[in-house]
Amino acid sequence: MAVDQVVKVGSALRITARCTAPITRCTACGVSSGRAHSRYVRRLADTAIGGQATGIDLEVRRFFCDNSECPKKTFAEQVDGLTFRYGRRTVPIQKVMERLALALGGRAGERLAMHLFVPVSDSTLLRLIRRLELPVIGEVEVLGVDEFAFRRVIYSRPEGVLDVVQAAVSPGDLRDGGGYLRPSITRNSGRGHACSASRVADDTAGIVDSTG
């Protein structure tokens, strides 16, 4: 990628750049191609520079795919570490937004983003969270049920505890011998909580957390 111009527009910076790689790989099949079809400009939001909002006007090319078995006839080139398909932000600012959304949520994240010179709405931050891939959960040996988080569910619908258990581990994990799933009941837990947990978890061993 070559940078052609950097100009200041009001209180923001605009960077004009273009892709220069002679060949690129098809985003569908991975076959390399050097036959350009057309050009167009992508306008991307980037991380702030020197306390100034920054945008990139990136000229990219659309290439023909020479693989006859590929479902795509043409494809747009991507710049590793900078662009992704259908994105209006660069990869670095996208990662910043994701971490901001996970740490603060919607409205609080929106307010902080204004100070970082990357304005974004609370609904956009929440959509970023929903699009994230869930982390891989390893083998669960002990699962603690937080009374305060699930109190209403447990009291109004005791089977709610079992729903939480089934969502966290597969049924086979309960009796495979590799570990034993136990709902953790603290000293401060209400009597109704303990009774509900014992009713819906007959196949597990209830324990009392002496640390409270």
Image (spheres, rainbow, N blue to C red):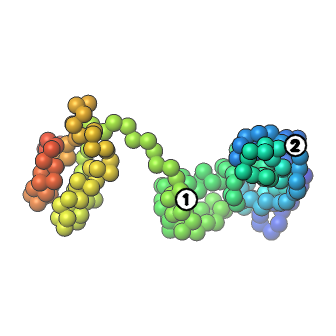
Residue placed farthest to the front in the image? Answer: 69
- Would you name the residue on which mark 1 appears? 128
Mark 2 and mark 1 in contact? Answer it, CB < 8 Å. no
User: Which residue extends farthest top?
Assistant: 178
Q: CA distance from mark 2 to mark 1?
A: 34 Å
Q: Residue at x 54, y 68 (%)?
A: 122
Of the numbered discs 2 and 1, the one sitting upstream in the chain is: 2
Query: At which x and y percent is residue 155?
Result: 17, 64
**In this figure, which residue is indicated by the disc labeled 2?**
34
Q: Secondary structure at mark 1?
A: helix
The quarter of the rendered structure image containing the N terminus is: top right
Between 122 and 77, the residue placed more toward the observer is 77
In the displayed structure, 177 sits above or below 156; it is above
Mark 2, Cα crowd under 10 Å, few <14 / some 14-19 / many 20+, is some
Q: Is residue 209 visible?
A: no
Residue 161 position within the rendered picture, expressed as x and y whole percent measured from the top left: 22, 55
Residue 126 appears in the picture as rendered: yes
- Label 1 sits on what residue type? Leu
Q: Amino acid at mark 2?
A: Gly
Foreground: disc 2 or disc 1: 2
Pick the front one: 150 or 55: 150
Q: On the picture, is 35 further left or further right than 117?
A: right
Residue at image point 18% right, 61% down: 158
Which residue does the image show at 46% across and 49% down from the upper left?
A: 134
The residue positioned 80% from the left and 39% from the top of the image is: 32
